[in-house]
Amino acid sequence: MGIERTAPLAGAAALCSGIGLARFAYVPAFPAMVAAGWVDGGGAGLLGALNLTGYLLGALGGRRLAGRLGVPAALDLGMALVVLSCLACAWPGGLAWLGPWRGLAGFAGGVLMALAGPAVQAVVPPARRPAAAGTVVSGVGGGVVLGALAVPALLPLGVSSIWLGLGLMSLLLWLPLRRYWPAPPAEEVAAGPGAAAPPRRWPGVTGLMVVYGLSAAGMVPPMIYLADLGMRGRGLGAAAVALLWALFGLGAMAGTLLGGRIAGRAGGMRTLALWMGVQAIALGAALLPGGAAVLLAAPLSGFAGVGASAVALAAARELAGPGAGLVWSRATVLYALAQAATGFVLAALFRASGEAHAAVFGAGLGLSLLALLAAARLARKRA
């Protein structure tokens, strides 16, 4: 296979491990860890917030790391940290032990997210870049589905087996595909292929950043508490919770693949407003009573929350043209910052409210509605 095929597959494997497994597999593991007494609900929420903080640091430092080590070595380091952090979390050492390792897992995911996509874009032919981008980002949804299947399968063997299994799966993804890591010059990854425009202001970019940041903050509840809502909040069994998270992953894959295509036809800003509407519906559905409502909220959350990245990227191209790489770099950091800050606030709210899921999902709905209003206003201005 040529590099236009192998590099995107390797990039997808990196995001499958660093985001789909190391980050998102924690969601179905959340209620199992609480039930086993490893942490309480508030502590589990704090672990999620620490992971988001690590992700922010990785997103900020990934390109600098690639400049010092080279892209392939930086990707190897990220994958090694994923494996190490998963294996370390297999020991029930309490919040003081698990917190730094979940933060390290987030850092690794941030590095992989910052480097994999731009590196693949830099080495594939221009005509293949849209398809390659879809392949790389689909690794996130694929990892979510894989984690949704693996966590309940491993749980009968104990919570430790979940983390050992996630570490082994990441290792099996890393070793055979690492020889296909893209190896562009580090400065090309930093700027993005063909990005020669100097930093400047583009009309509408500030509004796009506001919408994307609000979307990120609104998606924290489903990205951390969704499985716990299904199991402890709605009384769903292990099989139903596994289905719940698999639906989130399938929704993420659909939202990512469709987002770019629809944005190319209808316009990025109009499509972003549509995706924010879906996000608001998803958070509203999570507040409805009964297990069926949560099963509806899961795919809609994945569709909007993960798919919004593809739509926002298309909108950045519309607004900034050749400067889209710079805009996207800033948007990625803003997304991570918004999620990290919101994660800590919601962890405190969850604990203070007596672990009331309605409190955190209600906050997420409010933020999602603000994102919808801001996106609709931008779409009207763009029209």
Image (cartoon, helix red, strand yellow):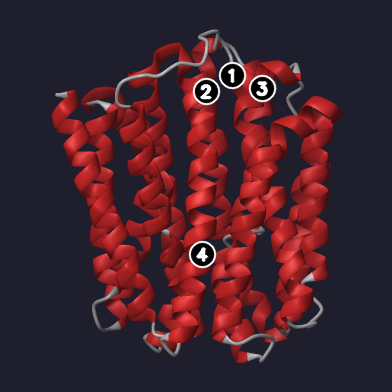
Q: Residues within 10 Å of mark 4 (few under 14, many from 20)?
A: many
81 vs 208, nearest the viewer: 208
Separation of marks 2 and 3 at Cα, in angstroms: 11 Å
Callout 3 touching callout 4 (CB < 8 Å): no
Closer to the observer: label 1 or label 4? 4
| Mark 1, residue position | 192
The residue beneath circle 4 is 343
For the residue carrying disc 3, how many other residues have a C-alpha within 10 Å: few (<14), some (14-19), or many (20+)? Answer: many
Sequence order check, earlier mark of 1 and 4:
1
Front residue (pair 296, 26):
26
* Crowd tier of the residue under label 1, counting other residues whose Cα lies within 10 Å: few below 14, some 14–19, many 20 or above: many
Please give the residue where the numbered disc 3 appears in the rendered image: 189
How far is disc 1 from disc 3 in space, using C-alphas? 5 Å
Report the front residue among 216 and 7: 216
**Residue 311 visible (yes or no):** no
In contact (CB < 8 Å): disc 1 and disc 3: yes
Mark 2 vs mark 3, foreground winner is 2
Q: Position of residue 342 (x, y in %)?
A: 47, 61
Q: Secondary structure at mark 2?
A: helix
Circle number at residue 326: 2
